Image: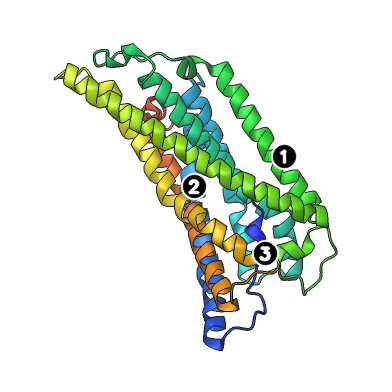
Amino acid sequence: MDHLNSSLLFPSPLPVPSNQSDFSSVFTQQVLPPLYLLLGVVGMALNTTAATIFFRVPSDSGLVVYLKNMLLADILMLCTFPLRAAAEAGLGGWRLRVAVCRYSAPLFYSSMYVGIVFMGLISLERYVKIVRRPSCSAPAGGSCPSLLSQGVAPARVLALLTWSLLLLSVLPNALLTSRPADASSHRCMQLKTSLGVQWHRVSTLSSVALFWATLLVLVSCYASIARTVLRAQRRLRHHGGHVCRRSSRSIASLLAVFLTCFVPYHALRVPYTLSQGPGSRFSPGTRRLLFHLKEATLLLAALNVCLDPVMYCLMCRSFREALLRRLAPGGRR
């Protein structure tokens, strides 16, 4: 999938005014690295805590399977933050920049898109549970059985296919970023073979298409869930729609995180890619501005690793109950 998006690890020697070059140096080398480190520390603390809790939660539903895999994707993504911050700050020299291009960056982007896929699978599981099952309007305390929510084996198969997609994207990007490098290698695209460049273009288009398709699934599922909840509330004036309302709020939180973290970056993705291509008609100043906006929105996408643990509490009752037991006096047993 995406591989540093043809971006620069450091500002390129484009002919830009000195004040803009100074801004670039401050933003990419002094502002972004500490922000990535902060996200890394907070995200790792939240996700390791979530991992210790999920370790005690049985994988007895498709939802739990998807959430656990999303947690793993976030942890893998977090592991790339220190290298990315060090490279942006100019530490480690050109060899670290090359390592980021060949290994860390493919893992960063692939983990992000794996997490996006699991968000889509979770929304489908919620859709089937609420919309496709008449028993969704059962009294409070009842359940809404579904093939996806109870089918652990199919969920594991889908998870395995998703991770296979990760390997399919990481390995070619790493293997085809193999051209000789030196201190003048500022761009990841300079390290790619001709086949690597073509693979990058295909994987970029695929990842962008995957994102917008997942967004369409999320919006469609939430719209259907919202209509079902409203109908249930009209039929049952008291507590009949409690289960559906709770599930509706959980999918709404998922959609909110998705829109906040990922839409700005992908809205900018197409103009940025066009500006970086060969024979681009964008001016150097516009190219540099798009690069800075891409880096800022990418940081917003990375914020997702800190928000996902909050969603686990909203979406998974078993996780929420295990967390409350742990927080209770004498809970650390």
- Mark 3 and mark 1: Cα distance apart in space: 24 Å
Which of the 4 quarters of the picture holds residue 258?
A: top left
**Residue type (three-letter) at the residue carrying disc 2:** Val
Q: Is residue 323 visible?
A: no
Taking the image as shown, residue 233 lies to the left or right of residue 205, namely left
Closer to the eye: label 2 or 1: 1
Which residue is label 3 attached to?
277
SS under mark 1 = helix
Where is residue 261 shown, x and y percent of the image?
Answer: 45, 51
How did the renderer colour the structure?
rainbow
- Mark 3 and mark 2: Cα distance apart in space: 30 Å
Badge 1 crowding class, 10 Å Cα cut-off, few under 14, some 14 to 19, many 20 or more, is some
Badge 3 crowding class, 10 Å Cα cut-off, few under 14, some 14 to 19, many 20 or more, is few
- Which residue is rendered at x = 46% and y = 27% of the image? 124
Q: Is residue 268 visible?
A: yes
**Residue type (three-letter) at the residue carrying disc 3:** Gly
SS under mark 2 = helix
Which of the 4 quarters of the picture holds residue 310?
A: top left
- Which residue is rendered at x = 49% and y = 59% of the image? 297
Lower position in the chain sequence, tag 3 or tag 1:
1
- Mark 2 and mark 1: Cα distance apart in space: 23 Å
Taking the image as shown, residue 49 lies to the left or right of residue 231, namely right
The dot on residue 168 is 1
Question: CB of mark 3 within 8 Å of CB of mark 2?
Answer: no
The dot on residue 305 is 2
Badge 2 crowding class, 10 Å Cα cut-off, few under 14, some 14 to 19, many 20 or more, is many
**In the image, is residue 167 above or below residue 196?**
above
**Residue type (three-letter) at the residue carrying disc 1:** Leu
Where is residue 160 shown, x and y percent of the image?
Answer: 64, 28
SS under mark 3 = loop
Question: CB of mark 2 within 8 Å of CB of mark 1?
Answer: no
